[in-house]
Image (tube, rainbow, N blue to C red):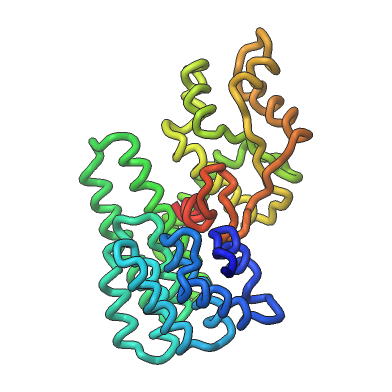
Amino acid sequence: MSELLTADRIDEIGATGPGSPDPAALVTELVSAVDEGRVADPADTGYALLVAADILRQAGDLADALALATRAIAEQPDDDAYARAVRAGLLLRLDRTDEGLAELTALRPLLETDPDAAYLIDELAGAGHTDTAVEWLTGALDVLLERSRAQQHESEDAQDAAAAMIYGLAQQRHDLREDMGLPHDEYDTLADRLRDAASHALDALDDGPATLLFWPKAEFDALLVRWPALAESYPTTWDGHRAQIERAFVETSGLGGTGLGVVAGSVDGLAAFAGTEPIDEETLDEYADSLEDTGVTSWPPGRNDTCWCGSGTKYKKCCLPRSRA
């Protein structure tokens, strides 16, 4: 019996496929495994087909890529938004504009609710419909800002989530309009102001290669229990903590920063390092420096690689979207 197609192998093909000397062989490997029921985790069947479709798309074989994307939708009917967006983008590239726009339009409300839905804009803009992409981003920002004003008494986490989505949409819109050579408008100004406001997350970064102190989930929770005063230095949740680091790296990379990475802290390690000294920002910085010799996790990982945060999920489905949040 032929080998099972594992998630790691799908990730590997996704990362190297377009640059492979024989991309057709990789597509055959993926599709054959699906056809023969050799995908190790059946839940990855749709993912394998989408990776194959992406390789074909980049090779210019749009019709066969469309067929695979259509199959992927059938394989994951309960979680098909991304596959539907990929299929719609291929329809646009094949000049089947009405069909492609209809599919994306059905998904458009996700821009107002799902922080990962930036792939809708990627498909529109990638197929040359940049004007429509900017229009949709503008509409989503209108809705989110109005909703934010109406929900000022929501929980802090809800307000943070709304602010994160506004930040991501504003930056994406700003970048598209800048590529189009359009003059600044009020939302471009908002994007600039939000980006400037996010600079506090960069204060911990040195001028040279930058390493940030990251707390795995269990350690993050234990950290704030042991030293409650540190709550003022960190977001209220672990998701907020890793999102802040991801955004800091994105901003730093955009400004030309290189050599980026994280070192994982532990409560016991910090206690041993600090001894009887108070745990303050300076101590945290010195502790982070002390960990660099024990191993730095480089940023960014490949889109299909395991996420740097240790969740075990693929980067593109974990912290990568947080860069837009």
| Residue 152 seen in render | yes
Q: Nearer the viewer, residue 4 or 193?
A: 4
* Farthest residue, direction front: 1
* Farthest residue, direction right: 293
Q: Residue at x 47, y 18 (%)?
A: 225
| Residue 177 seen in render | no
* Side (left or right) of 134 relative to 2: left
* Farthest residue, direction left: 150
Classify residue 189 by image quadrant: bottom left
Name the spot of residue 276 as percent of width and height, x first.
66, 8
* Farthest residue, direction bottom: 95
Q: Residue at x 42, y 31 (%)?
A: 236
Relative vertical location of residue 214 with respect to residue 145 in this rendering, above or below: above
Name the spot of residue 194 as percent of width and height, x first.
46, 50
Name the spot of residue 201 as percent of width and height, x first.
56, 40
On the rendered image, what quadrant is the N terminus found in? bottom right
Name the spot of residue 74 as percent of width and height, x first.
33, 73
Relative vertical location of residue 227 with respect to residue 26 in this rendering, above or below: above
Q: Nearer the viewer, residue 135 or 119?
A: 119
Relative vertical location of residue 285 with respect to residue 19 in this rendering, above or below: above
Give the total of numbered labels: 0
Q: Residue at x 41, y 60 (%)?
A: 43
Q: Residue at x 26, y 72 (%)?
A: 106
